[in-house]
């Protein structure tokens, strides 16, 4: 199985700040990567697919980039509603595997 | 609009079988794959298995011996059955629709399952 290593595990940032979350795959996943946001007590919500494509309805302050084994999610101008956990997931190979998550809090 | 909704018991005794139902609307099970994903309390997401649009199934190898996924297309339902439950099977169980080429674009609200005597 492809292992997804996500960092940092937790992150504290101020409103308006730019934050970046990283995900590293154990092998090349050829941009087969999605990012999800999960608020407490809620289901995950798709943010990004194909490493850099914004899902319908997702604010443009979210963006994804990367290639090969290294990927990142960037949130520009952090808003209070962005407080959540974020997960990466590879779907290049079966089984689909998730990163352990990043918990984003306000400073 | 697209919706998925999980249903099933909130409490299961150790060694017993968990049975969950995912009822979908707004799309056809013969056009999309539906997956099951679970999440232990305070932890990350684990893929469990999928029902493909054509009726084929795939399972997480760690769960394969205990897990079965089936469907009833006439009722727009996908079923999960997992036997020999233990306390570390406690968590929230989600069904989710897969988009092509990948990623899960719609999720159910989840059902919390506690394994305890």
Image (spheres, coloured by chain):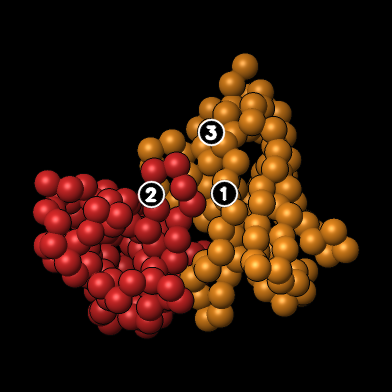
Chain colours: A red, B orange
Mark 2 vs 1: CB contact within 8 A:
no
Dot 3 or dot 1: first in sequence order is 3
Provide the residue designation for mark 1.
B109
The image quadrant where one finds the N terminus of chain A is bottom left
What kind of element bears circle 2?
Answer: loop
Label 1 marks a residue whose chain is: B
Q: Residue drawn at (17%, 48%), measured in percent from left and top?
A: A106
Is A52 placed left or right of B72 in the picture? left
Provide the residue designation for mark 3.
B90
Q: Residue drawn at (56%, 58%), measured in percent from left and top?
A: B107
Across and down, in percent, residue A8 comes to 19, 54
In the image, which is nearer the foreground, mark 3 or mark 1?
1
Provide the residue designation for mark 2.
A39
Nearer to the camera, A32 or B95: B95
Is A42 placed left or right of B99 in the picture? left
Q: Is residue A88 above or below residue A32?
A: above
Mark 3 vs 1: CB contact within 8 A:
no
Residues tagged by mark 3 and mark 1 found on one chain of the structure: yes
Label 2 marks a residue whose chain is: A
Spatial CA distance of label 3 from label 1 is 16 Å
């Amino acid at each position: 199985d492809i292992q997804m290593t996500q960092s940092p595990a937790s992150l504290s940032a101020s409103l308006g700040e730019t934050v970046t979350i990283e995900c590293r795959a154990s092998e090349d996943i050829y941009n087969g990567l999605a990012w999800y946001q999960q608020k407490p007590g809620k289901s995950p919500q798709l943010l990004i697919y194909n490493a850099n494509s914004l899902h319908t309805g997702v604010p443009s302050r979210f963006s994804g980039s990367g290639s090969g084994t290294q990927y990142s999610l960037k949130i520009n101008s952090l808003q209070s509603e962005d407080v959540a956990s974020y997960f990466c997931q590879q779907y290049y190979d079966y089984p689909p595997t998730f990163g352990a998550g990043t918990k984003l809090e306000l400073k | 609009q697209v919706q998925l909704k999980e249903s099933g018991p909130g409490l299961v005794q150790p060694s017993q079988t968990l049975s969950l139902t995912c009822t979908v609307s707004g799309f056809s099970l013969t056009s999309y794959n539906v997956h099951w994903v679970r999440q232990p309390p305070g932890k990350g997401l684990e893929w469990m298995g999928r029902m493909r649009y054509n009726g084929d199934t795939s399972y997480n190898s760690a769960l394969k011996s205990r897990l079965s996924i089936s469907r009833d297309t006439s009722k727009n339902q996908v079923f999960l059955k997992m036997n020999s439950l233990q306390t570390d099977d406690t968590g929230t169980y989600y069904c989710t629709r897969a988009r092509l080429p990948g990623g899960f674009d719609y999720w159910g609200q989840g059902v919390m399952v506690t394994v305890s005597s």
